[in-house]
């Protein structure tokens, strides 16, 4: 059963701030789209919300989310673990890791898909679909199966056997297209002609994934606050492609500030495998296409930037740091020695932290949190044997 939150009052554009009726904006804000300034949309809520202490996981925060009832597999409540040895080695007050790889399918995507599936169910769709290199494909396939929906995952030949097997095991259909752009074109055609409900972006320049799904990422911020209270991290390092997670974390902390629970937002740091957001923050147009080959870090690869990523960093006085994918393997190995075995894309957060310390972007007394988005059992074993 899916029940939309009665507090959802309207929607709005992140860029032009236009008020929009509650609906599905698969291509982002229609006003910005018409001007070639593609931008995501989000939700506005009315009235007050409270945490439901009788519930666990994401249901605990249902009053802050687009659906108060939604398909759930027990996602959320992931641990935040301090790593004192790493903090000491880098000369920092504290380094913590938020273990998003302990969600049901091993990644943060499990916070997003309950609400995408809920929206598809509410609107009478029978098929959900995504353009995905891995984590989103697996997660959406599993949540669709749990809800009794058909699922189509559109990928490229680069999809690994590990992800392919997981997607197929959940009963989803896997469609292979030759290029990332071809994935988007195919998905868009099926949305328009067969009524598939899209979880992810399908246009260029891109917008974020389903705004209903991104709301689920706010719960990471709520959990961090409940655990840390007055000792919130100064910086939060996030692996970034098109910034769904980055924007969701920002919105969660913005909610907490609006409630009066916090006075200051943690500074968000986007970690990417090639300079994209770095260049955008330095003045380049966010609609620029950036060249770079990132097969080892496909989960955060691609040559595009979204407006939501730029905005999340600006609103938190954050910054972006790029780490070449060639450093991913050594980052995985080093983090594993502290007890955290991460997917290659996720492990780049360590490289981002080290580089930021060397460039003196962090003060020695800084309290830092790393978002570990996906576990290393998805890595190609040949890279480590």
Image (cartoon, rainbow, N blue to C red):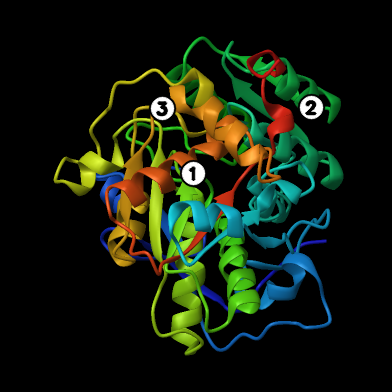
Q: Which residue is painted at 62% across and 57% down in the image?
A: 83
Q: Quadrant of residue 193?
A: top right
- Between 85 and 56, the residue placed more toward the observer is 85
- Between 88 and 5, the residue placed more toward the observer is 88
Task: Mark yes or no: residue 179 visible.
Answer: yes
User: Which callout, 3 or 2, points at the residue further toward the start of the chain?
Assistant: 2
Q: Which residue is painted at 47% across and 84% down in the image?
A: 262
Task: Determine whether the residue tagged by mark 2 lies in a helix, strand or loop.
Answer: helix
User: Which image quarter holds the C terminus?
Assistant: top right
Residue named by callout 3? 302
Kindly indicate whether the residue at mark 2 contacts the one at mark 3 (C-beta within 8 angstroms): no
Q: For marks 3 and 2, give the CA distance.
A: 23 Å
Give the mark count.
3
Q: Which residue is painted at 79% across and 27% down in the image?
A: 166
Residue named by callout 2? 166
Q: For marks 1 and 2, give the CA distance.
A: 25 Å
Task: Mark yes or no: residue 207 visible.
Answer: no
Q: Residue 137: give x, y in percent of width and height.
A: 67, 32
193 to 81, vertically: above or below = above
User: Which callout, 1 or 3, points at the residue further toward the start of the chain?
Assistant: 3
64 to 261, vertically: above or below = above
| Mark in front: 1 vs 3 | 1
| Mark in front: 1 vs 2 | 1
- Between 132 and 352, the residue placed more toward the observer is 352
Residue named by callout 1? 349
256 to 370, vertically: above or below = below
User: Which image quarter holds the N terminus?
Assistant: bottom right
Q: For marks 1 and 3, give the CA distance.
A: 17 Å
Q: Residue 310: give x, y in percent of width and height.
A: 30, 52
378 to 34, vertically: above or below = above
User: Which callout, 1 or 2, points at the residue further toward the start of the chain?
Assistant: 2
């Amino acid at each position: 059963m899916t029940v939309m939150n009665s507090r959802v009052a309207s929607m709005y554009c992140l860029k032009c701030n236009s008020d929009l009726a509650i609906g599905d904006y698969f291509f982002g804000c229609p006003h910005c789209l018409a001007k070639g300034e593609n931008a995501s949309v989000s939700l506005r809520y009315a009235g007050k919300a409270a945490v439901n202490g009788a519930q666990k996981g994401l249901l605990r925060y249902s009053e802050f989310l687009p659906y108060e009832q939604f398909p759930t597999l027990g996602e959320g409540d992931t641990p935040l673990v301090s790593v004192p040895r790493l903090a000491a080695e880098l000369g920092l007050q504290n380094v913590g890791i938020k273990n998003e790889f302990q969600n049901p399918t091993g990644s943060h995507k499990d916070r997003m898909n309950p609400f995408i599936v809920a929206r598809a169910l509410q609107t009478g769709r029978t098929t959900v679909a995504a353009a995905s290199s891995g984590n989103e494909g697996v997660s959406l396939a599993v949540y669709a199966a749990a809800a009794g929906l058909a699922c189509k995952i559109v990928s490229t030949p680069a999809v690994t056997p590990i992800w392919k097997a997981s997607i197929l095991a959940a009963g989803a259909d896997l469609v292979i297209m030759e290029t990332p752009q071809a994935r988007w074109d195919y998905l868009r055609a099926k949305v328009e002609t067969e009524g598939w409900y899209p979880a992810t972006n399908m246009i260029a320049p891109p917008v974020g994934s389903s705004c209903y799904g991104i709301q689920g990422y706010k719960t990471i911020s709520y959990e961090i606050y409940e655990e840390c209270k007055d000792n919130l991290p100064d910086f939060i390092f996030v692996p970034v492609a098109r910034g769904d997670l980055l924007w969701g974390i920002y919105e969660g902390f913005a909610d907490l500030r609006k409630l009066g629970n916090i006075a200051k937002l943690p500074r968000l740091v986007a970690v990417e495998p090639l300079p994209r957001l770095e260049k955008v923050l330095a003045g380049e147009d966010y609609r620029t296409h950036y060249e770079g080959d990132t097969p080892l870090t496909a989960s955060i690869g691609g040559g595009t930037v979204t407006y939501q990523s730029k905005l999340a960093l600006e609103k938190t006085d954050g910054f972006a740091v790029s780490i070449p994918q060639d450093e991913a393997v050594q980052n995985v190995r080093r983090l594993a020695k502290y007890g955290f075995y991460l997917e290659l894309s996720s492990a780049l957060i360590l490289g981002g932290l080290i580089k930021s310390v060397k460039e003196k972007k962090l003060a020695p007394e800084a309290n830092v949190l790393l978002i570990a988005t996906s576990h290393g059992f998805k890595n190609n074993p040949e890279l480590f044997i």
